[in-house]
């Protein structure tokens, strides 16, 4: 797929924001992966990344200072789902995906 320069810059900007979020919140991906492993072990072959993100938001809200600046941008869900499936082949197809800016990124 050939992208315009502006589209390529948008992809890069989203990717950089996602990487910065992961760096600032290193607990997020391991927490998501732990939930996926648990679901998979219980026999689930498919689940929604949005549901898992909402669980993390809830857990963070109930265990941290309410003035915390933690923000979980929904735009990161596509990157996270793809990253989990790519880095853990056992979970290939665990999340349904739609065409996304995350598809246009080199790593996911």
Image (spheres, helix red, strand yellow):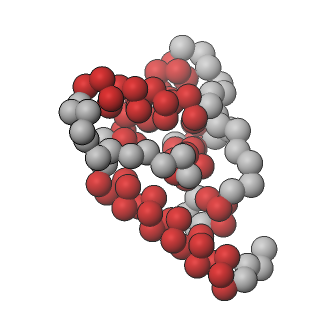
Q: Quadrant of the C terminus?
A: bottom right
In the rendered image, is residue 83 in sight?
A: no
Identify the residue shown where x is 59% and y is 49%.
78
Q: x, y percentage for residue 80? A: 52, 47
Q: Nearer the viewer, residue 39 or 58?
A: 58
Q: What is the residue that sits farthest to the bottom in this orientation?
A: 5
Q: What is the residue that sits farthest to the front in this orientation?
A: 67
Q: x, y percentage for residue 4? A: 72, 83
In the rendered image, is residue 17 in sight?
A: yes
Q: What is the residue that sits farthest to the right in this orientation?
A: 1
Identify the residue shown where x is 53% and y is 65%.
14
Q: In this view, does 78 lie above or below 62?
A: below
Q: Is residue 104 above or below residue 61?
A: below
Q: x, y percentage for residue 99? A: 74, 54
Q: In this view, does 44 lie above or below 69?
A: above
Image label count: 0
Identify the residue shown where x is 53% and y is 21%.
39
Q: Which of 89 and 101 is in front in this view?
A: 101
Q: In which quarter of the image is the N terminus?
A: bottom right
Q: Quadrant of residue 18?
A: bottom left
Q: In which quarter of the image is residue 97?
A: top right
Q: In the visual, does 101 lie left or right of 65?
A: right
Q: x, y percentage for residue 48? A: 62, 31
Q: In the visual, does 3 lie left or right of 33?
A: right
Q: What is the residue that sits farthest to the left in this orientation?
A: 65
Identify the residue shown where x is 35% and y is 26%.
59
């Amino acid at each position: 797929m050939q992208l315009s320069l502006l589209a390529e810059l948008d992809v890069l900007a989203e990717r950089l924001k996602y990487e910065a979020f992961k760096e600032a919140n290193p607990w997020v991906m391991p927490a998501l992966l732990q939930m996926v492993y648990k679901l998979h072990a219980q026999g689930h072959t498919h689940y929604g990344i949005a549901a898992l993100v909402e669980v993390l938001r809830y857990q963070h809200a109930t265990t941290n200072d309410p003035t915390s600046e933690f923000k979980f941008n929904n735009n990161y869900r596509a990157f996270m789902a793809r990253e989990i499936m790519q880095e853990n082949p056992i979970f290939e197809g665990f999340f349904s995906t739609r065409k996304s800016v995350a598809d246009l990124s080199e790593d996911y």
